[in-house]
Amino acid sequence: MSTAANSAAGEIKKSAGMFTFFGILMVIFGILAIGSPFVSGLAVAMYVGAMLFVGGIFRLIFAFKAQSLGSGIWAILVGFLTILAGLYMLGNPVLGLGMITLVLAVYFFIEGIFEIIYAFQVKPMIGWGWALFGGLVSLVLGIMIWRQFPVSGTWAIGILFGVHMLFTGMAMLGIGSAARSMAGETE
């Protein structure tokens, strides 16, 4: 086997190892998030607050660099509003979590309706049933989160975030395993 093939196999193995390592971490953090949904939900709310704060600072910088008085004033106002929203969420993460939960409930409800409509529009196609199923799940999830509010604020974001991390970690483990197999075939 050539040196180039050995080098490529080594790089693939290194990447596979990284995917596997981070996949395991994601699975562990996903399980922890599901196990403590309120804490993980607060972490998400604080993250959103921090991103709003940073985004507001960037908006202000852009507004001052734009140097146009008409649209610049609006950009400055939106920048300050974004910073205030971020600070509010950082200072009151429980209320921020509640707002995110309500937005998520409305999103799932609307997305579910549109996905159901889409499923019936493409009905003869293969897979339309899965689109219908996904729409129904989204619709029921949106209604469930809305009806259980404010209690759903203590579990919805954290569990959904944990499930997302869990499945992302499992996908990373799958990619790492496939890459390791590919490296073995290359050698």
Image: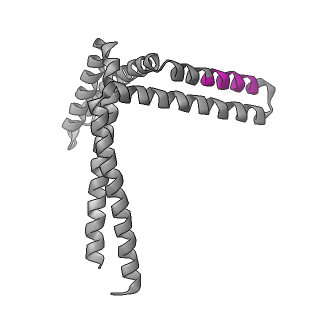
Q: Which residues are magenta?
A: 71-83
- Residue 24 seen: yes
**Up-down: is 165 above or below 46?**
below
Q: Is residue 72 magenta?
A: yes
Residue sitting at the far bottom: 1
Relative to the observer, which residue lies in front, 25 or 110?
25
Residue 69 location (% of width, % of height): 80, 26
- The residue depicted at 19 percent of the width and 36 percent of the height is 129
Residue 19 location (% of width, % of height): 35, 57
Q: Quadrant of residue 143?
A: top left
For residue 35, side relative to residue 63 (left or right) = left
- The residue depicted at 28 percent of the width and 42 percent of the height is 166
Residue 108 location (% of width, % of height): 33, 25
**Up-down: is 6 above or below 25?**
below
Residue 15 location (% of width, % of height): 38, 63
Relative to the observer, which residue lies in front, 76 or 108?
76
For residue 22, side relative to residue 96 (left or right) = left
- The residue depicted at 34 percent of the width and 55 percent of the height is 21
- Total numbered badges shown on the rendered structure: 0
Q: Main secondary structure of the magenta part?
A: helix
For residue 79, side relative to residue 100 (left or right) = right
Image quarter where the C terminus lies is: bottom left
Q: Quadrant of residue 30?
A: top left
- Residue 149 seen: no
Q: Is residue 109 magenta?
A: no
- The residue depicted at 25 percent of the width and 35 percent of the height is 131
Relative to the observer, which residue lies in front, 173 or 93?
93
Image quarter where the N terminus lies is: bottom left
In this picture the colour scheme is one colour
